[in-house]
Image (cartoon, rainbow, N blue to C red):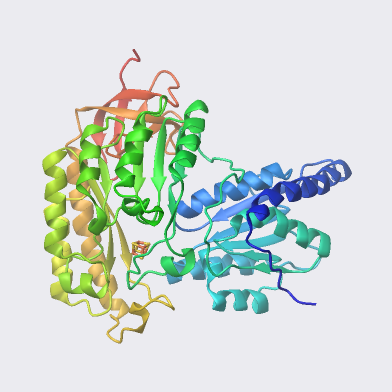
Amino acid sequence: MTDEVIIEATEDAVQRQYVYIEKVKEITAEQTSREGRQPTYDVRVFGCQMNEHDAEKIIGMLEEMGYSKASAGEQADVIVFETCCVRENAEEKIYGHLGILKPSEGDKRSIVAVTGCMMQQPQVVEKIKKSYRHVNIVFGTHNLHLFPELLYRYMSEGRRVFDIWDAGSQVVEGTPITRTEKVKAWVNIMLGCNNFCSYCIVPHVRGRERSRNKTDILEEVKRLAQGGYKEITLLGQNVNSYGNDLGLKDAFAELLYALNAIDGIERIRFMTSHPKDLSDSLIQAMKELPKLCEHLHLPFQSGSSKVLKDMNRKYTKEQYLQLIDKVREVIPDIAFTTDIIVGFPGESEEDFQDTLDVVKRVRFDMAYTFLYSKRTGTKAAEFSNQIPEKVKKERFQRLVETQNAIGAELNLKHEGLTEEVLVEGKSRHSDAMYTGRTREYKLVNFTCDEDLTGQLARVKIIRAWPFWLEGTAEPHQ
Ligand code: SF4
């Protein structure tokens, strides 16, 4: 008996999932009447927004199949891991979580499924096969939509199911989805990446760029607007190249104009933008379209042109700084956020000083800072001039201190101002406060006499904290 299950990649396979959803539903209905409780699920997500959004699809399918969310501390009937392989410590964490799940005698047995980017790496799948025998179902990023079929196969045949596709040629539409938020939603506009930055595993595990059709995106956003959603964030590894694979030119800016016209949606964001592809037409759209927020996430990764070349980023320090100036000239109040990698192979102290220089010159509102992590299968993993951990960590510390001081200073400028905040609900900090974000993506926690969740509130900022703003809502008009 083999572990492998191969399912053909046909259009029919997508439609067929609805048949499998019904089949699993019969099993869960029978379990519900037998045990007097609805079977439960627990979906654990690691990594980026793309994974968060994929998890919403897995949850959507599970709920369609008759599962409900497990309560905290309860061992769920189905546990799904949505994995990330961008950094080594993320992978180690996931192995740790999987190890904890190994059943001991007499334990209630859950069905354990693992998916996401890690599963696109053959060495990982081999390790799961051999060392994590309590994992029942393994599937990859390209066949996520087949989860009902794989789950049913496991339930009906009782043997482990492994189904990983090397590449995805399709963009799958029509997968059930349960959104985890009620006010703002993620919308995938494209999958995969063509850039092959030398440190990055994403193109190897998510495949080449595939854009969704504009009409499918517009339909999805119209449905979100009808469902009361106010903000959308368009997702793609490099949204600026949206449509290139469909033979379209300037398609991303055109898409933004069409989305801006949808009634009910108040705010539009997008991520991620590659500096080499940020077009004039996009900058113009950001200036003209009232719903596009004054916030741009523009990863620069390193301030050294030499390191950027080794990273295969296809821009120099000077070009990046010129781009920032160009955007600021058109949209003066824009907030920039970025991603930075410290300790890329061959990074000298001088190269690192260039990174600090960019941070000081641009003055980012926030930066996601990472220690370089060697990823098997990428070009940079083969570079011989790897940087010692101690040096990486010391540079990382200096970078974080520099950026945090700038972020805190920029936050201070908001004290005394009244900001438009899209209210997302109660604050995690305090039950007496609500939370939301400004158009510049600043997190605001504020007091308010009424629950304005889902609405745009005017909030007077009374205090700036290093990573958030504190305010009080002005009377609602
Ligand atoms: S643009 Fe570069 S960093 Fe971003 S996903 Fe593609 S290869 Fe990775």
Q: Residue furthest bottom?
A: 384
**Does the image show residue 398?**
yes
Ligand 1 rendered quadrant: bottom left
Report whether 459 appears left or right of 32. Answer: left
Q: Nearer the viewer, residue 410 or 22?
A: 22
**Does the image show residue 70?**
no
Instruction: Determine which quarter of the picture holds residue 108.
Output: bottom right
Report whether 419 appears left or right of 231. Answer: left
Instruction: Determine which quarter of the picture holds residue 71.
Output: top right
Residue at the spot x=40%, y=53% of the render? 246
Where is residue 218 shown, x and y percent of the image? 45, 36
Q: Nearer the viewer, residue 18 or 451?
A: 18
Residue 83 in the image: above or below residue 466: below
Report whether 439 appears left or right of 97. Answer: left
Q: Residue furthest front?
A: 247
> What is the number of callouts on the image?
0
Residue 268 in the image: above or below residue 453: below
Where is residue 161 shown, x and y percent of the image? 71, 67
Instruction: Determine which quarter of the picture holds residue 300.
Output: bottom left
Residue at the spot x=43%, y=22% of the render? 452
Name the image quarter holding the N terminus.
Answer: bottom right
Where is residue 352 shown, x and y percent of the image? 18, 70
Report whether 72 appears left or right of 445. Answer: right
